[in-house]
Amino acid sequence: MKPNFKPQTDLQSIADFAIAHQAENDRFSAFIKEFNDEDIDAKVQELDAIISPTISCTDCGNCCKSLMVCLNEEEANNLSSHLKMDRPSFDEQYLEKGSNGMMIMNQMPCHFLQDNKCTIYEYRFEGCKEFPALHLPHFKRRVFTTFMHYDRCPIIFNVVEQLKNEMNFERTQTQ
């Protein structure tokens, strides 16, 4: 990584770049599948450890504004208890349930986002805790979802762009 690396954090610039480089990103998704899983995981985790501390999630909050969050029964029970609500009332106010039992928060942005901060941080859901999941193993299995969030998360965007550089990926020439 270049010394004095300054991450891109402007969401509009990131979104515009993502659109302009869609074909390149598709090629990169295929390109990294040819590499060893452990090597890719190590490189992604190394870049994440360098880049994540340079980006303040509370400056952005875009994940909480634009992602559907899934939760499980235990998480719903914990949060409803914390909010001093019975489960039926909690469910009615905050959840949407699928016929398969899947539960998601029923609005975007998240009910619990205020001034780009989570008002239930200690009780947030596992999916929230893990996002953007670059610290987790099996990155290659999550390439599709990584690129789904590439245009909305500055951490993902910067890690992927640096990964391209470090893997000497041949980029598309843009004007």
Image: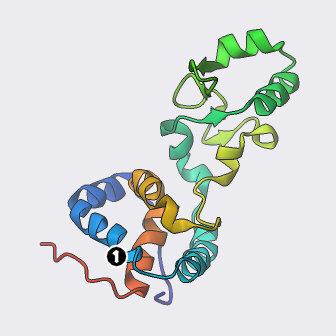
Judge left or right: residue 47 versus residue 34: right
Residue 171 falls in which quadrant of the image? bottom left
Residue that appears at 30% across and 66% down: 25
Q: Is residue 22 left or right of residue 79?
A: left
Say above or below: 67 vs 107: below
2 over 55 or under it: above or below = below
Image position, residue 109 (x, y; %): 53, 31
Q: Where is residue 160 in the image (x, y as percent from the top left)?
A: 43, 70
Residue toward you, 157 or 23: 23
**Residue 168: horizontal and vertical position, in percent?**
35, 88
Q: In this view, does 121 lie to the left or right of 114?
A: right
Residue at 55% x, 75% y is 44
Quarter of the figure with the C terminus: bottom left
What residue sits 66% from the left and 53% below the top?
130
Name the amino acid, label 1: Phe
User: How is the model colour-coded?
Assistant: rainbow
- Image quarter for residue 38? bottom right
- The residue identified by callout 1 is 31
Residue at screen point 33% across, 70% down: 30
Disc 1 element: helix
Q: In this view, does 136 lie above or below 122?
A: below
Q: Is residue 1 left or right of residue 136?
A: left
Q: Which residue is outermost to the left? A: 175
Q: Where is residue 115 in the image (x, y as percent from the top left)?
A: 61, 38
Number of numbered discs on residues: 1
**Number of other residues with Cα within 10 Å of mark 1, as a class: few under 14, some 14 to 19, many 20 or more:** some
Give above or below for 65 relative to 140. above
